[in-house]
Amino acid sequence: MFTLARPLVTKAFSRGLAWKLPGVGIATIYTLPELPYAYNALEPYISEEIMKLHHQKHHQTYVNGLNTAKEKYEKSTDVREQISLQAAIKFNGGGHINHSLFWKNLAPAGSTNKPTGALKEAIDRDFGSLDALKKSMNERTAAIQGSGWGWLGYNKDLKKLEIVTTANQDPLLSHVPIIGIDIWEHAFYLQYKNVKPDYLNAIWSVINFEEAGQRYEAATK
């Protein structure tokens, strides 16, 4: 019986993890990263209850699912089973990638919530102003049908910032992620109900622009 070479998915997956996230590697057991702040640190913009559920339940579920699918894949010698497991690896692996980035993407209000330096210059160059970026990104993200993510990404080919969306838990692979916004209902529904624009307006008060600036500088080197 033909066997799909085991490194095929894991190596390709690792290339999508070029963001230096915790618990990443071909032979690694993936783990839930700790938050860099307290669960209530983002209030009133994101509630403590949401943060606990989002981190401890939802992200942990992706970690568990990724470890289970990866273990089955590595033990399997059946090409059909290996192919069938790739969807679970993509979904749960994407959930782990996206959320590991998302937690660092946020910071308590008033701490690092304004872009500076090279990132500010790039935002002004590519969007005209921070307010224009917020408006465009909020509109694109709110328009996602179902669940997904809105991204400010750096296009290495065009050497510019662009707004991109991905469905479900698909990670951003076409661009270097600078800022990501989770538009799954578990990220906002307990607090904002079905009013996505209110959540999207509020989250900019806790965006970690210091982290975003570091990602941008790394991407442009």
Image (tube, helix red, strand yellow):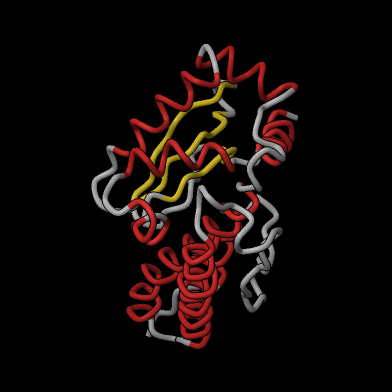
Query: If the image is split into quadrants, where does the C terminus sit?
Result: top right
Task: Identify which residue is drawn at 51% across, 88% down.
Answer: 75
Q: Position of residue 151 (x, y in %)?
A: 47, 39
Task: Give the quadrant of residue 27.
Answer: bottom right
Query: Closer to the camera, 99 or 97?
Result: 99
* Drawn side of residue 1 relative to residue 114, left or right: left
Query: Closer to the camera, 81 or 121?
Result: 121
Q: Position of residue 132 (x, y in %)?
A: 46, 18
Task: Identify which residue is drawn at 59% across, 29% down.
Answer: 156
Query: Closer to the camera, 31 or 46?
Result: 46
Q: Position of residue 85 (x, y in %)?
A: 39, 75
* Drawn side of residue 15 relative to residue 138, left or right: right
Count the marks: how many? 0
Query: If the image is split into quadrants, where does the N terminus sit?
Result: bottom left
Task: Give the quadrant of residue 125.
Answer: top right
As drawn, the residue found furthest toward the front would be 44
Q: Position of residue 170 (x, y in %)?
A: 41, 54
Query: Closer to the camera, 98 or 26?
Result: 98
202 to 217, vertically: above or below? below
47 to 123, vertically: above or below? below
75 to 175, vertically: above or below? below
33 to 47, vertically: above or below? below
Task: Give the quadrant of residue 28.
Answer: bottom right
As drawn, the residue found furthest toward the left would be 145
